């Protein structure tokens, strides 16, 4: 393969084309060779749920699995619907701030929720 089809994120030569996008199976990066870096910015920006749906402030999400509440003996059950989330930038991965009835204010990781 030539240099233009190597993954720009990890330089893997195993990238393949799917319609108008190139996809790297090693790191999951997707890009378009026709529009350059401008096409990758919207795909990478924002918070996405476990299924890849974009999340926004005020959305409702459903917790996908039982989660232990840190500092407590309670458990947040899978299937719990959380309304009116707020997105935040977090270095530890907890990028959703919310208030849950019976538990209170807490932060969640977007990888454990799906958009309702």
Image (cartoon, helix red, strand yellow):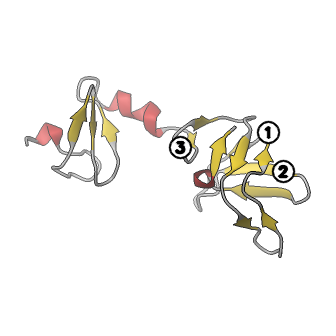
Q: Earlier in the sequence, mark 2 or mark 1?
A: 1
Circle 2: element type: strand
Instruction: Mark 2 and mark 1 in contact? Answer it, CB < 8 Å.
Output: yes
Going by the image, does 6 lie left or right of 111? left
Q: CA distance from mark 3 to mark 1?
A: 19 Å
Q: Secondary structure at mark 1?
A: loop
For marks 3 and 1, the one nearer the N-term is 3
Q: Which mark is residue 99?
A: 2
Q: Residue furthest right?
A: 102
| Label of residue 59 in the image | none
Quarter holding the C terminus?
A: top right
Quarter of image, res 77: bottom right
Helix, strand or loop for disc 3: loop
Placement of the N terminus among the 4 image quadrants: top left
- Mark 3, residue position: 51
Q: Could you give the CA–CA distance between mark 2 and mark 1, rounded to whole angstroms?
A: 8 Å
Query: Decide: marks 3, 2 in contact (CB < 8 A)?
Result: no
Q: CA distance from mark 3 to mark 2?
A: 22 Å
Say above or below: 38 vs 109.
above
Q: Earlier in the sequence, mark 3 or mark 2?
A: 3
């Amino acid at each position: 393969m030539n240099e233009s089809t190597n993954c720009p994120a990890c330089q893997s030569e195993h990238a393949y084309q799917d319609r108008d996008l190139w996809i790297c199976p090693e790191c999951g990066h997707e890009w378009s060779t026709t529009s350059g870096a401008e096409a990758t910015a919207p795909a990478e920006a924002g918070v996405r749920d476990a299924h890849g749906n974009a999340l926004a402030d005020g959305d409702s999400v459903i917790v996908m699995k039982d989660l232990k509440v840190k500092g407590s003996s309670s458990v947040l059950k899978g299937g719990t619907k959380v309304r009116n989330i707020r997105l935040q930038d977090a270095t530890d991965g907890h990028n959703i701030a919310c208030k849950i009835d019976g538990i209170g204010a807490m932060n969640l990781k977007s990888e454990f929720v799906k958009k309702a």
